[in-house]
Amino acid sequence: MLHQVHQLNKIANKPERIILGLMSGTSLDGLDIALCKVSESGICTKVQLLHFETIEYDADFKKDIQSIFCKEVVSLEKLCLMNAQIGLVHSQIINNTLAKLNLRNCDVDLIASHGQTIYHAPKSKHQQQKFGNATLQIGDADHIAFNTNIITISDFRQKHIAAGGEGAPLAIYGDYFLLSSKDENRILLNIGGIANFTFLPSSLHIDEVICTDVGPGNTLMDAFIQHHFPNKFYDENAAIALEGNVNDDLLKALCDHKFFKQTFPKTTGQELFNFQFIENALVASNTMNITIADVMATLNYFTAHTITAAIKQNIQQKNYSIYISGGGANNPLLIKNIQELLPNISIQSTDVLGINPNAKEAILFAVLANETVCGKSDFYQQPNTKFPPITMGKISFPR
Ligand SMILES: Nc1ncnc2c1ncn2[C@@H]1O[C@H](COP(=O)(O)OP(=O)(O)O)[C@@H](O)[C@H]1O
Ligand SMILES: [Mg+2]
């Protein structure tokens, strides 16, 4: 409808836009909502975070998502139902949050909705010659646009794949736009379910930027806790891991997986790194009888080891600073292990750069939506760089 296209054009030409970034990661902990004021675009983008919260999913909803999450075989009917249901639940969360903040829905220009990843299948995972990279996020954005009456940009990952990528990590765009610095080489490390990092060289040369998944973030620790403690979701403040000791045999078995031998950049998910992965390593190393605390201490160390090994392998520069975001930034033992494995490197939270570490991913999707409506063509007319110069996301109008 012409009116809606005009409205979008008006939003694109505003000096600043209010964009609600939504992130629901593979940890299935809840929906991150970042209400952002965004101005300009590309490397000139400025973001002010007006409000952030994570709305925890209730147990029933989590179970419904888990029933179709990262499994090769699921009920097609359930998948179909959940595509609509996640869109609906997310719109209710948005409407409630805006009402709580005394904001009207018309005060928000755009919603940036990541959706719920339910399967991530780069070629390295599925290994079927005739198929390319693929990934699937659900939570239909027409439901969100209709039920909130806010134009919604969604499903960002598909064009990245169409342009030759694996659909992840998309953090590279927002990290480069918002956090590059000519004063220092930076690594932006996000520890969500899966861990990834972006290397931003002080040269600011786009061709030297590196972005890759490294393997598990919180996911193995979460999987083991959820298996053994029906009422716990994660190892809060590493309380259990801190009681145990690293088991070298188990550690060796965990490291012995072909994912770690693949070349960078690469992406992955819970299709590989799940409870079965831990079980296989326990059996292979004959450590089935060690304590839960020892397994947790080992998983925690293993996660720090795979993160730091990937950084050492990719970054030739001696001097760089690491800035951490994602839920893993709240795990004190994980951070201590990472610091011990990189003793001479400064490691801080993205807080010191003015970015709330828990909100970072949701903010980055708000930045991607901002690019979709008003990214400047000079960035997108570059030849293919390490990250394809494309805008991403599909546009859903409310009516
Ligand atoms: N206080 C804490 N101690 C240990 N781990 C934590 C803490 N807070 C959050 N986490 C971890 O962070 C995870 C959520 O991280 P998040 O960045 O939201 O991941 P995702 O993007 O996959 O949803 C939780 O599942 C948990 O493992
Ligand atoms: Mg989360």
Image (cartoon, rainbow, N blue to C red):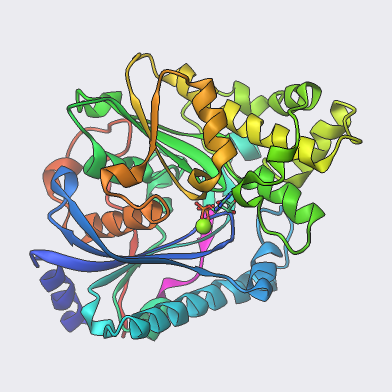
Residue 216 appears in the figure: no
x and y, in percent, of residue 11 in the image? 15, 70
Q: Nearer the viewer, residue 396 or 338?
A: 338
Q: Residue at x 68, y 71 (%)?
A: 64
Task: Assign the C terminus to one quadrant of the image.
Answer: bottom left
Number of marks drawn: 0
Q: Foreground: 302 or 110? A: 302
Q: Is residue 322 above or below residue 239?
A: above
Based on the displayed image, in which of its 4 quarters is residue 220 positioned? top right
Q: Residue at x 79, y 27 (%)?
A: 250
User: Residue 189's image quarter?
Assistant: top left
Where is residue 202 shown, x and y percent of the image?
A: 22, 25
Viewed as shown, does residue 327 lie left or right of 277?
left
Residue closest to the eye, 134 or 219: 219
Residue 254 vertical placement versus 389 (above, below): above
Q: Is residue 73 visible?
A: yes
Q: Residue at x 28, y 59 (%)?
A: 369
Q: Does 128 lie within the magenta span? A: no
Q: Which residues are magenta?
A: 136-143
Residue 317 % position (x, y): 34, 15
Check the picture and name the quadrant holding the N terminus. Answer: bottom left
Residue 383 screen position, x and y as percent: 22, 32
